[in-house]
Image: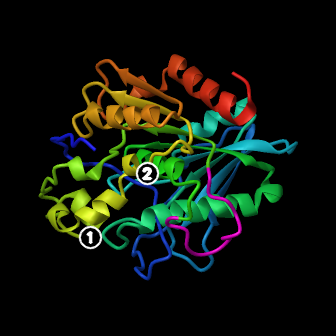
Amino acid sequence: MRRILLPVLLALALPAASQTNNPSPAQPPKHSAHAEPADIRILRDLPYVSHGDPLQKLDLYLPKTPGEQRPLVVFIHGGAWRAGSKDNNPAAFLIRSGYVSASLGYRLTPNAIFPAQIEDCKSAIRWLRAHASEYGIDPQHIGVWGSSAGGHLVAMLGVTGQTRDFDVGENLDQSIAVQCVVDWYSPTDLLSHKSVIEPKYGNSSLDQFLGGPLAEHREAARKASPVYYVTKNSAPFLIMQGEKDPLVEPAQSRLMDAALRQAGVESTLEIIPGAKHGGPEFMTPERRKTITEFFNRHLKGSS
C-alpha cells in the first residue's frame, strides 16, 4: 500500500489495555465535581478485567428510568497512549436519543505497550456484551467512537471484529464485533508516521507505544495500523478530520476512507475547514446531528 509521509507530532491517545504483566502505577482518575445530569445515571469505575489494573475500568451512562434494551455507544479517549481520562464522555448526549453509553479507561504507556491497548478495548467490549442484560444493553447493536489515539483504537475495533486478533483474557465466548465506527482524527498507518522526539518525555509517543524506535519495530507498527486490516467485512465508518490538524495530517483519514471504499465498505469522510486537532468545530449542532443520524442508521435502522 502506498506510503504517505506525515510530519506528525504524534499526540494521540488510544484506549487500551491488555492482559499483559506490566502493572501501571497510574491511580484511578479523580472524578469531576460537576453535577451529573438529572436524567442520566452514571455508574463509575466498573472493572472489565478481574483483579486488573486501576485503569482497566469503564464508566457506564444510563437513562435514569430503566426500560427496554438500548443500543450502546462506547467512547474511547485520546492522549498519546500515555495520558487522557475516561471522565469526559462526548457521547453522553446520545442517552437522550435512546442509547446507553460507556467511556473506557485503559492502560497507558510506558507501562503497557502495544498490543495492550487494543486488547483492553476488546476485553471491555466482551465484558459489556456479557453484562448486557444487567445494564439494559442491546448486545447486537454496539457502536464505537474515539478521538485521536482513541480514534485509532476504535478504527482497530472496526476492522478486526470478524477475527480473534488481540482477543485475550475473559469472556472469550462473546463477540468483539462492532456495528459502526465514528473516528475522529486518528492515525491509520503508523508506518507513515515520523517519530518525533518530545523533550518532556525523551522520546516520541509513537516510540513509547511500540516499545522502541519505529525503525526497530516496523512489524509492530504494521500490526497496529488499522488500514492494513480493512476487508469487505469491516464496520461502516464516519471519519471526521480537521483540515489544519498539526498532529495528524488529513492524509491519514483520506487513506483509511479510500481503503474502506475500495473494499466496498460504507465510509463517510468529512474534512472540517479550518479545524485543528479537536476543538468545538467537531461538536457543533450540525455535527452532533450527523453523528446521531449515523448511529441511528446503523444501530437502530433509522435516521
**Is 142 in front, or is 232?**
232
Expressed as whole percent of the image width and height from the top left, the position of residue 25 reads: 39, 75
Magenta-tinted stretch: 165-177
Amino acid type at mark 2: Tyr
Quarter of the rendering occupied by the N terminus? top left
Residue beneath disc 2:
229
- Residue 151, relative to residue 45: is it above or below? above
Residue beneath disc 1:
211
Determine which quarter of the picture holds residue 294: top right
Report the side of 51 relative to 24 (left or right).
right
Q: Secondary structure at mark 1?
A: loop
Expressed as whole percent of the image width and height from the top left, the position of residue 115 reads: 41, 67
Report the side of 172 relative to 140 (left or right).
left
Whether 280 is among the magenta residues is no
Question: What colouring does the structure picture have?
Answer: rainbow
Expressed as whole percent of the image width and height from the top left, the position of residue 286 reads: 53, 17
- Residue 213, relative to residue 183: is it above or below? below
Report how many numbered discs are placed on residues in the image.
2
Q: Nearer the viewer, mark 1 or mark 2?
A: 2
Q: Seen from this angle, which residue lies furthest right?
A: 67
- Residue 132, relative to residue 57: is it above or below? above
Expressed as whole percent of the image width and height from the top left, the position of residue 68 reads: 87, 43
Q: CA distance from mark 1 to mark 2?
A: 21 Å
Judge whether residue 76 can be spotted in this image. Answer: no
